[in-house]
Image (spheres, grey):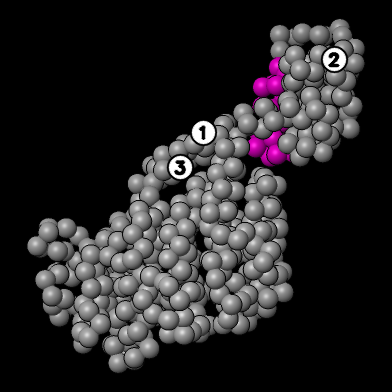
């Protein structure tokens, strides 16, 4: 269908994007005086019975899956029209792919907020026995804090009673999707279910916090081989500030065998809510709105909030004598905050030009090293540590060196 042809009452303005099935245009609906997005099946697709069937299934899926995190369908050409098209809401926001390109990788809590909203959308789809099969950053929009899942062009029915109104045989699986985000079973073209979308969501979250694909390779064949062999780089290799629980969540989502993944979008949502609570995030939409408005200011605020949470957890770990947890927390604090800033915040210690530590207001000038160390730890954990002696082994080398230098003459 050409831009010069009339799409019923809709006035086509410009091209928004295109894919394998067709093109998406921005258009104006004069009857309701609103902007809309029109997806038009390409000429070859209109002449292909299988492509036409997939297009009809997309219309049925979007119509049935009504949810704020799923793009809304306004109008449809009808299955028998010579030129098939869908009229959907126009979401003026950017795709996650564009946001990554423009702003770089997201922080862990921001990515978790996106994951939470995706899980809500998938809960609805899977409840209607439909899998998306093509979850990727290009198909996810963000606008005013709202995450919107789009492009249901390769949906699949996974049970007899499904929202598409077709049998499972009618959506018999071809190898469809985007290789970098496809689960191993998609390449085999069988045994697809809700956990297939869980895998793709894990790949998207990995991409958001690292700027990399979990199974990046040289060419499609290499990517496919890495996915099948489950060869991916620990995300902390790209972003060392990521928490252990978050990386464990990614590992569960990206497990090669479906039975080892989280079983449902509801489980994913619950795990994400738990991690968001650890980060001190209670209002997901508000968090995403702040990210959109001013990513730099939002990142700074998140960093300070994250440090507050880490220091709180460190105090508890020290009180409980949990050495492994304390080490892990201190390592994350070291990444988030420079040594000088962190040491001063906790203990009032600054370093002079010769990298010798000085206590604020020259306190404890004459004190021995043991007294200073005790004071530092006392300030760190407050009254909780009054009767607890902690060994140097708990502290990373940078802290050990700083504390050791306190015994040098000032």
Label 3 CA crowd tier, 10 Å (few <14, some 14–19, many 20+): some
* Residue behind mark 3: 284
| Closer to the camera in the image, 141 or 410 | 141
User: In the rendered image, is residue 107 in sight?
Assistant: no
Label 1 CA crowd tier, 10 Å (few <14, some 14–19, many 20+): few
- CA gap, disc 3 and disc 2: 40 Å
Q: Nearer the viewer, mark 1 or mark 2?
A: 2
**Secondary structure that dominates the magenta span:** helix
Mark 3 lies on a secondary structure that is helix
User: In the rendered image, is residue 236 in sight?
Assistant: yes
Q: Which residues are magenta?
A: 331-350
The image quadrant that residue 86 belongs to is bottom left
**Between disc 1 and disc 3, whose residue precedes?**
3
Residue at the image position 50 percent from the left and 50 percent from the top: 116
Residue at the image position 60 percent from the left and 43 percent from the top: 275
Q: Nearer the viewer, mark 1 or mark 3?
A: 3
């Amino acid at each position: 269908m050409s831009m010069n042809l009339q799409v019923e009452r809709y006035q086509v303005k410009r091209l928004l994007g295109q894919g394998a099935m067709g093109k998406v245009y921005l258009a104006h609906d004069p009857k309701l005086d609103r902007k809309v997005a029109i997806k038009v099946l390409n000429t070859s697709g209109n002449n292909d019975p299988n492509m036409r069937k997939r297009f009809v299934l997309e219309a049925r899926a979007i119509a049935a899956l009504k949810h704020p995190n799923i793009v809304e369908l306004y109008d449809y050409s009808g299955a028998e029209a010579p030129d098939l098209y869908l009229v959907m809401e126009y979401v003026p926001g950017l795709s996650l792919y564009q946001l990554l390109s423009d702003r770089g990788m997201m922080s862990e809590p921001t990515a978790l907020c996106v994951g939470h909203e995706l899980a809500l959308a998938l809960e609805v789809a899977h409840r209607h026995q439909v899998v998306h099969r093509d979850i990727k950053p290009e198909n996810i929009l963000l606008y005013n804090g709202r995450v919107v899942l789009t492009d249901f062009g390769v949906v699949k029915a996974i049970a007899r009673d499904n929202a598409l109104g077709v049998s499972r045989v009618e959506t018999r699986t071809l190898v469809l999707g985007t290789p970098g985000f496809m689960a191993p079973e998609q390449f085999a073209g069988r045994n697809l279910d809700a956990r297939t979308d869980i895998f793709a969501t894990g790949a998207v979250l990995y991409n958001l916090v690292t700027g990399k694909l979990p199974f990046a390779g040289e060419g499609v064949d290499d990517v496919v081989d890495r996915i099948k062999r489950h060869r991916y780089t620990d995300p902390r290799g790209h972003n060392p500030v990521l928490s252990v629980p978050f990386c464990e969540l990614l590992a569960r989502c990206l497990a090669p065998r479906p039975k080892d993944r989280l079983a449902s979008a509801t489980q994913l949502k619950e795990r994400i809510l738990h991690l968001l609570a650890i980060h001190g995030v209670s209002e997901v939409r508000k968090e995403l709105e702040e990210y959109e408005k001013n990513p730099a200011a939002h990142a700074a605020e998140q960093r300070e909030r994250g440090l507050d949470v880490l220091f709180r957890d460190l105090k508890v770990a020290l009180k409980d004598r949990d050495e492994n947890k304390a080490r892990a927390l201190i390592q994350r604090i070291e990444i988030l905050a420079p040594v000088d800033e962190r040491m001063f915040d906790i203990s009032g210690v600054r370093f002079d030009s010769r990298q010798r530590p000085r206590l604020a207001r020259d306190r404890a000038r004459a004190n021995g090293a043991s007294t200073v160390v005790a004071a530092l730890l006392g300030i760190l954990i407050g009254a909780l540590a009054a009767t607890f002696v902690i060994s140097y082994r708990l502290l990373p080398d940078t802290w050990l060196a700083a504390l050791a230098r306190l015994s040098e003459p000032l």
